Amino acid sequence: MRLINRREMLAASAGAAALLAGSPLARRSAFAAERPALPIPRELRPGPNGEVRLNASPSSVEFLSGVKTPTFGINGPYLGPAIRARSGETLQMRVHNGLAQDLTMHWHGLKIPGDVDGSPYNIIRPGANWDIALPIDQHAATCWFHPHVYPATAELVIKGLAGLFLIDDEQSDALPLPSTWGVDDIPVIIQDRHFNSDGAFFHRFNLAAVTTGYVEDVALINGAVYPQAKTARGWIRLRLLNGSNARSYRLAISDDRPFFVIASDGGLLEEPVRLSELTMYAGERYEVLVDARNGNPFELVTRPVSQLAMNLPPFDTDLPLVTFVPDGADGRGRLPDALVPLEPLDVNLPPVSRNFVMNMNLDDQGMKLFREAGLMAMNKSGKSDAETLRKVRALLYDGPPLSLSQQLSANAVNGKSFALNEVSDNAPIGVNLRWRLSEGDDRMLHPVHIHGCQFRLLSISGKQPPAHMRGWKDIAPVEKGGFCDIQVAFRHPASRQYPFMLHCHILEHEDSGMMTDFTVS
Ligand code: C2O
Ligand code: CU
Ligand code: CU
C-alpha cells in the first residue's frame, strides 16, 4: 500500500478545491472519465416471512486512488443497503456482529418499542446475532440505521456503519413521485472524513472533537469522493441524508435552480416547499425534487456554514458534492401540488413539561484553543491564512486524545453526563406533550434527536419554523443560546431495561455525555 503523507493529502484536497473553483460543467466534460460513478446502495426488501439480514463486518475501500482505507460495512465494504419496508408489516430482523467489538443497530426515526430500538442497551457481542421483530407502524419516510454503542457510536459510524431505511405506504404509492431507485429516485448520503497519513479515517477524542465534533476535510457521497450520476431526464427525487458525525451543510444546486422539499425526517409534507438553499444538520433527512426535464447537468453544492470550524477549506466556498447528468430515458415522476394531509397541531397542548438543556463542560478550554489558534479572528475577517489554517488543523487532527474519564464528562444534558443504567425520567404513553430542548452555554448549535417518536417543531427560539420544517421531525436544531419547543407523543413503551435516548446528534457530543434516557409507560 502506498502511504500518502499529510502534505500530499492536503495538497490533494487543495488541488481538488482549486479544480472545483472553475466552471463546474466545463470541468465535468473534461474530467468526467476520471470521476467515480455515484454508488447506489442496494435496495433490501424483506423476504417472504419478513426476514431482513444485516451483517456488519470489517473491510477496506480505496476512496483515494492508491490508498486503502480500513472500513466497516453492512452487507458490503462501506455503508449498508437501503432497507425497504411497508407500513403495517413486521420485519424479522437479524443483525450479525462480524466485528471484534460490541455493536448495536439503531433504527433512527422509527416509532418502535424501546426493547427493539437498538440503543446502547441492546448490545450485540462480537460474533453474536440480534434477532428481533420490528413492527413498521408509521407513514412513508426516509429513515436510517446506525450503531449506537456508548461511547463508540462516533467510531462505528465514521468507519462506515450506516444505511437508509425507507418506508412506503398507501399515501406514498398514490402520489406520482419519481420512484425508480437509482434512476430518478436517488439516495444521497453526505458524510465528511479526514484521512490520516496512513489512509485510515481520522478518529480521536481530543479537546477539539468534544467541542466541535469531527469537522473533516473530504466530502463523501454514498462513499465516493465527488462522484457523478447518470439519471433519468425529468423530475429527480433526491433522498438526502446528512450522515456526517457533526458537520452541517447548506445545500444548493450549482445553477441556482430552485428545488422542492417534499419530505422531512419522518415523512411527506403537506405540500412541496420551494427553496433555493437547504440547511441540513447531522442526522437529518429531506427528500427534494429537482426539475431536470431540460436534461442539463447540475451539481449539488454545499455553501459555507458559519458554525465553528465548519468553513475551513475546502468548505470555505461553494463546494460541489456530486454531479447529476440527466440524459437518460424520460422519467415518469412529477411534482404534485399537494402531498399528504398532516395532523393539525394540538390546540390543547399542555405547557412545557420538560426542558432538556444541552451543556458543555470542556468548551471553555476548547474555545480557548481555537481562539488562540486564530480561528475566531479568521472567521470574522473571512480570510483564511495558511498559518492559522495549519494551527486549527493541528488542533482538530493532531490534538492529544482525552482520557476516557475526561471524554465521558466533557458534555452533559441538564448538568449530568450520560451514564448507562441510571434512568430517572419517564414520559407518559400516548399523550401529546410539549417539550423544550435548549442550549445552555451560549456556545453552539446542537441537532437534538429523540428516539421512539416523530415530533413537530412548534418554535425555533421563539420563531415559527420555516415551512419545510413543519412536518414530522426527529431532529431539532437547537441554536446557540436558543431553544426548540416541540409537540411530541410516544405511542410505544420503553422499559427501564430498554429506555429511549435523547441526545445531540453530533456523535462526538453524544459519546462524551450529551445524552440522557427515559422510560415510556
Ligand atoms: Cu441517529 Cu440516537 O440516533
Ligand atoms: Cu434515533
Ligand atoms: Cu451537540
Image (cartoon, rainbow, N blue to C red):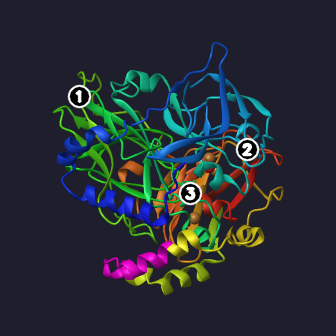
Q: What element does badge 3 sit on? A: loop
Of 183 and 349, which appears nearest the observer?
A: 183
Q: Which mark is residue 276?
A: none
Q: Would residue 369 appear left or right of 220 to someone viewing this image?
A: right
Of 165 and 458, which appears nearest the observer?
A: 165
Q: Do residues under tags 1 and 2 come within 8 Å of each other at their CB atoms?
A: no
Q: Residue furthest top?
A: 48
Q: Amino acid at mark 1?
A: Arg
Residue under the image location 42 percent in, 64 percent down = 10
Instruction: Name the residue carrying label 3.
Output: 198
Q: Can residue 237 be seen?
A: yes
Q: What element does badge 2 sit on? A: loop
**Relative image position of residue 267 (x, y in whole percent):** 47, 38
Q: Nearer the viewer, mark 1 or mark 3?
A: 3
Instruction: Name the residue carrying label 2.
Output: 103
Give the magenta-colored segment's residue range: 378-393
Q: Would residue 99 appear left or right of 137 to someone viewing this image?
A: right
Q: Amino acid at mark 2?
A: Leu
Of callouts 1 and 3, the N-terminal one? 3
Local crowd at mark 3 within 10 Å, few (<14), some, or many (≥20)?
some
Residue under the image location 55 percent in, 82 percent down = 369
Q: What element does badge 1 sit on? A: loop
Local crowd at mark 2 within 10 Å, few (<14), some, or many (≥20)?
many
Of callouts 1 and 2, the N-terminal one? 2
Q: Do residues under tags 1 and 3 come within 8 Å of each other at their CB atoms?
A: no
**Relative image position of residue 308 (x, y in whole percent):** 46, 72
Mark 3 residue CB less than 8 A from any atom of ligand 1: no
**Figure quadrant of residue 209:** bottom right
**Figure quadrant of residue 384:** bottom left
As displayed, is residue 109 above or below residue 47? Answer: below
Instruction: Name the residue carrying label 1.
Output: 233
